[in-house]
Image (tube, coloured by chain):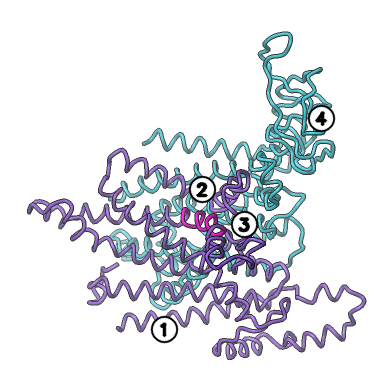
Amino acid sequence: MNYLGRRLVRAILLLVGVSALCFAFTEMAPGSFFDEMRLNPQISPATITSLEEHYGLNQPLFVRYERWMQAAAHGDFGYSIAYNTPVAPLLWSRAKNTLLLTIVAMLLAWLISVPLGVWAAAQHGRMLDKMTGVTSSLFLAVPEVVFAVALLAIVVRWRILPFGGMKSADFDGLSTWARFWDVAGHMLLPVLILALADGTIIFRHVRASVLEALEAPFVRASRSFGISRTRLLFRHVLPVAAGPAISLFGFSLAGLISGSLLVEVVCGWPGLGPLILDATLSRDFYLVIGGLIFSALFMIVGNLIADIMLVVADPRIRAGVPDAP
Amino acid sequence: MRLKTFLLLAALVALHLILLFAGFVAPYDPAAQDRELPYAPPTGLHFKDASGWHLRPFIYAQTIAPDGYVENTSRSFPIHLFVRASSYRVMGIIQTNWHLFGVAGPARITLFGTDGFGRDEFSRVLYGGQVSVAAGVAATLIALLVGSTFGMLAGFFGDWADESLMGTTELFLCLPWLYFLLGMRAFLPLQVSALKTFFLVTCVIGLIGWARPARLVRGVVLSARSRNYVLAARGFGASNFYLLRRHILPELSGILLTQATVLVPRYIAAEVTLSFFGLGVSEPIASWGNMLSTLQQYSVLVSYAWMLAPMGALVITSVIYSLLADTLHSQLKFHSS
């Protein structure tokens, strides 16, 4: 428990650090949301000053940070200037779409990659293992932008799947069942891109850790006792190989919000990604900070969950063995 | 194994030489527009005409017809090697007008087609590669420099230096990097000159990425500082600086080299992503990212497949780098065990 307690304290410190870093950057920023208004002769400087006062932008950095921290502790992440609403509900309404996308993609990636990785490791050195190895390293080398744009190009060119956005134009007129299939169809392309990119990494890690466990001395000893290959693999090797996979699962959880930004923008999925990109371009600072904190929160909580799962799964960490992973 | 590494290194050097001498390899200026030829498809290389086969390939001039481009077969334009055309500067210094290949006007040889302004896509891929790869390499240098400095300090001095520096790396590692990149970019001026944006983007990418190399370097330093020869040197009265420079730094060469091959393609992709979003290097300077950003229009994506050319270049670069990283990694493991 001591270990988890330290992790928790560290997680909170990290969140404070991220928010402080964000505010430090806003201070360095030369531009402001009202820059364009300043160029407009119909808006008087007094209006802009009063607007700045209204949004509290004329306060010094530390005052703003302190007020923001106090509000954030109560779940209030400030006010979006461009959308003219509080940031938190806005973020949450978009984050729901993002989570829908990423959770489905994550499940798909794990369900396919883990059995495939174990299988490839058990087949080590044979033709099929080598083929999957080469394919996965090629996939790993290709940047995500390329994946996304190439798949989108294929889909748009041959009209295989619905693309662009999340719903068809006639969505409101559809029955519940038809709505479900409509969203599922629109989701297929971004989910495929995400699952392909993540699945490759998971596959490589699972294969490597199973392979390492298969070659461990205790496995060789067990084999010499006459334990069958299947029992050896499932009873003795997999629990040992689970450690790195659990850490990786934490990373998967951590990336639930932030991992899909690129794919969302490319596919036009109405998630957090396009929102933050627009906020970036229009310099809507509190929205950007809110998005950053929100995704950092997922990052930190995801890693924390991985730590907890590791403690549950690995007795070495519980006992505080010094060379435990 | 040796041969594979050698071939990969040769491919890497060739790639960078081509990009370095983009002005020579590219037949046209990357910003030269031809409004008569928007979205022209790649010119076909021909070897056979009415009079029979030719050893020297030739092209036909393209003209717009009601349903796309047609080749005007009445006159052929042979491709010549080493021709004089538009002038450019080699590495920004030597002014010259020699090009690797070209055709006589009015025909234009567009190997990868043209974009919406009739600019030669092939030349733009080469010039864009200069920008994107330079950004990736420069960002890697920054990340490795900062990372190895902090990693060495943390690993060598331990105690509170280690605690605080590793705490900071954890902070940077748990940042969602693309969001953070966007965020940092948001807090910097939007409209600045292309050169400034280039430096900005490089610094932002490099400064976000320093944490991972720092951790790796720290690990190596931690094991290196308790080696017997380091302890012996310390016993002879060697200063900390001498130990770091003479005994610790050489130990790092392997890991830094591997990290460089891992990071460069990743940072090239980061620059491409930022420019793709319109936050990186902007027009009229070409970069693979801002060339790809026209593909955000579905009409371009569907009708003009040759606009995907920068993606091909990006994939080739990434694959070469990552294959090299794999071989380096396995050789390093082989050496250390």
Disc nearest the viewer among 3 and 2: 3
Check the image and report above or below for B119 versus B137. above
Q: Which amino acid does label 2 sit on?
A: Val
Q: Which amino acid does label 3 sit on?
A: Val
Q: Distance between the residues labelled 2 and 4?
A: 36 Å
Q: Name the residue under label 1.
A: A9
Main SS category, magenta section: helix
Q: Mark 4 points at which residue?
A: B63
Q: Distance between the residues labelled 3 and 1?
A: 37 Å
The quadrant of the image that shows the N terminus of chain A is bottom left
Which residue shows up at 57% across the image and 38% down it?
Answer: B15
Q: How far apart are marks 2 and 1 (CA)?
A: 38 Å
Instruction: Find out whether residue A192 is within the magenta segment.
Output: yes
**Callout 2 and callout 4 share a chain:** no
- Residue B193 in percent (x, y) is at 77, 58
Q: Mark 2 points at which residue?
A: A142
First in residue order: circle 3 vs circle 2: 2
- Contact check, label 2 and label 4, Cβ < 8 Å: no
SS type, badge 2: loop
- Chain letter, colour purple in render: A
